[in-house]
């Protein structure tokens, strides 16, 4: 059997992440422990926003009022797009369009809520710099979260921050095998990396990160979810 | 280094696919050729809709009129949602919401257009049955296509048909590590498999299929994109 073109490894044994934790240390120790996959030049690490937020202390208490969650969602949103009962589809202060402003009440103490990181691209850049300093590796970082989709049932993981890996690969101007210009040509590879990572996280519990090995080396450049992927309100057709 | 939790292999050397081709034979020969990854029980094969459509003869000639493409898009659509110049966002006759009804003018002879498969779930079931007959394997099939997203720049691959693999994994009723009910709990794993496959297809050209090895065995059950993932117009908040 040949080597896989792409290999995805769970980072196991990270344990509970609390405010002030050094995520780079936790991930490096878990990944390079005996039997772990290590972290090599060219790897992309996908890490869930949940543990990034917990490490950064982006956790708040909900008061007892019945509308506490709705008020919290509103406080994290630049505009409300749709409201159906308890479900709000909003544009967050970061520009993401998602349910309930990405606020998460699972895997956190009762009465507490985890917010999205303040600036996930910055969080990714920090984590990348910390891992480079510690391990001397050149890697990409993707911070993932779970979003719904307008026209399709079910949720998938997407990127809400990245560093050292392209948000979008622009193939405009590339010719197909017949010499004609390709049409759908801006591929959002960080969202595909986040989705691929989730396939491994979902197989078990308590897997906050995966290592993806074999990513095309030309994708490993400066990237930003906010600058490349977040669509300005005026640019879409449905807002 | 441990075995990867998920390994993705390109299926190389399939060659040009034309109307009437036996896709199962082409994929089986390419995958099991010397140096190939083989096809094993529990694998999921992701194959692009393009080669499925070509094998099924879903290719039509465009006439010379300047609006030929727009008329073709309209003919494949149940309703037009938005129109901006040449770009139409429509709901296809299958129920997919995408640009230009999924019609593809690249990698096909000048003046010709590739339509989506008539019924991609059926195409996936056929391919699965053909491969089982030929190789005696129990596998999953995902037929992928490249769609844009309402709120995010760039395109990603999603599933437009599947067989032998769940469309959506329903985790409703599952408790998190703290014993609280999980919230975002219907995970669209076939879309994540399609996205993961695209990471390998995009690294090279002429890769119409990949083999994903290591997929959670409980996901390998009957599945359908049309029944599980296509959101009925009355069920979404933006149509």
Image (cartoon, coloured by chain):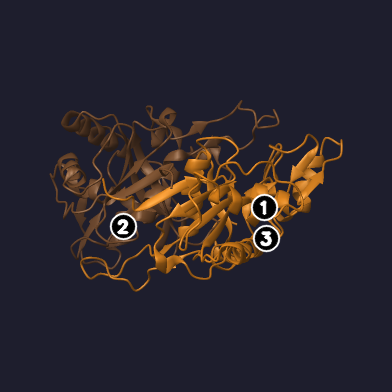
Chain colours: A brown, B orange
Q: Residue at x 47, y 67 (%)?
A: B220
Q: Is residue B95 visible?
A: yes
Residue A200: image location, x then y, percent: 35, 54
User: Spatial distance from mark 1 to mark 2, Cα to Cα?
Assistant: 49 Å
Question: What is the secondary structure assignment of the residue under circle 1?
Answer: helix
Q: Residue at x 32, y 55 (%)?
A: A201
- Of residues B159 and B148, the one nearer the viewer is B159
Q: Nearer the viewer, residue B180 or A82?
A: B180
Percent from the top left, x then y, of residue B19? Answer: 76, 50
| Local crowd size for mark 3, using a 10 Å CA cut-off: few (<14), some (14–19), many (≥20) | some
Quadrant containing the N terminus of chain B in the rendered view: top left
Element type where label 2 sits in the image? helix
Q: Which mark is residue B52?
A: 1
Judge by depth and name the residue closer to the eye, B3 or B88.
Answer: B3
Closer to viewer: mark 3 or mark 2: 3
Residue A38: mark: none
- Tell me if A181 is positioned left or right of A130 in this view: right
Q: To which residue does mark 2 refer? A: A71
Does A162 sit above or below residue A110?
A: above
């Amino acid at each position: 059997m040949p080597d896989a073109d792409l290999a995805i490894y769970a980072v196991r044994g990270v344990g509970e992440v609390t405010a002030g934790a050094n995520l780079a240390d936790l991930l490096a120790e878990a990944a390079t422990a005996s039997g772990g996959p290590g972290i090599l030049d060219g790897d992309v690490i996908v890490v869930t926003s949940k543990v990034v937020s917990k490490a950064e202390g982006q956790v708040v208490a909900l008061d007892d009022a019945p509308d506490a969650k709705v008020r919290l969602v509103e406080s994290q949103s630049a505009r409300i797009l749709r409201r159906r009962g308890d479900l709000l589809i909003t544009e967050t202060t970061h520009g993401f369009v998602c349910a309930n402003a990405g606020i998460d009440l699972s895997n956190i103490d009762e009465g507490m809520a985890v917010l999205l990181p303040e600036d996930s691209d910055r969080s990714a850049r920090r984590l990348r710099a910390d891992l480079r300093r510690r391990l001397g590796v050149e890697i990409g970082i993707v911070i993932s979260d779970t979003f719904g989709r307008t026209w399709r049932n079910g949720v998938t993981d997407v990127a809400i921050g990245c560093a050292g890996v392209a948000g979008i690969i622009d193939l405009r101007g590339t010719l197909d095998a017949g010499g004609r210009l390709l049409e759908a040509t801006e591929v959002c590879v960080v969202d595909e990396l986040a989705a691929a990572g989730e396939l491994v996280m979902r197989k078990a519990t308590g897997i906050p990160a995966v290592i993806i090995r074999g990513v095309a080396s030309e994708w490993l450049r400066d990237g930003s979810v906010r600058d490349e992927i977040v669509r300005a309100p005026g640019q879409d057709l449905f807002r």
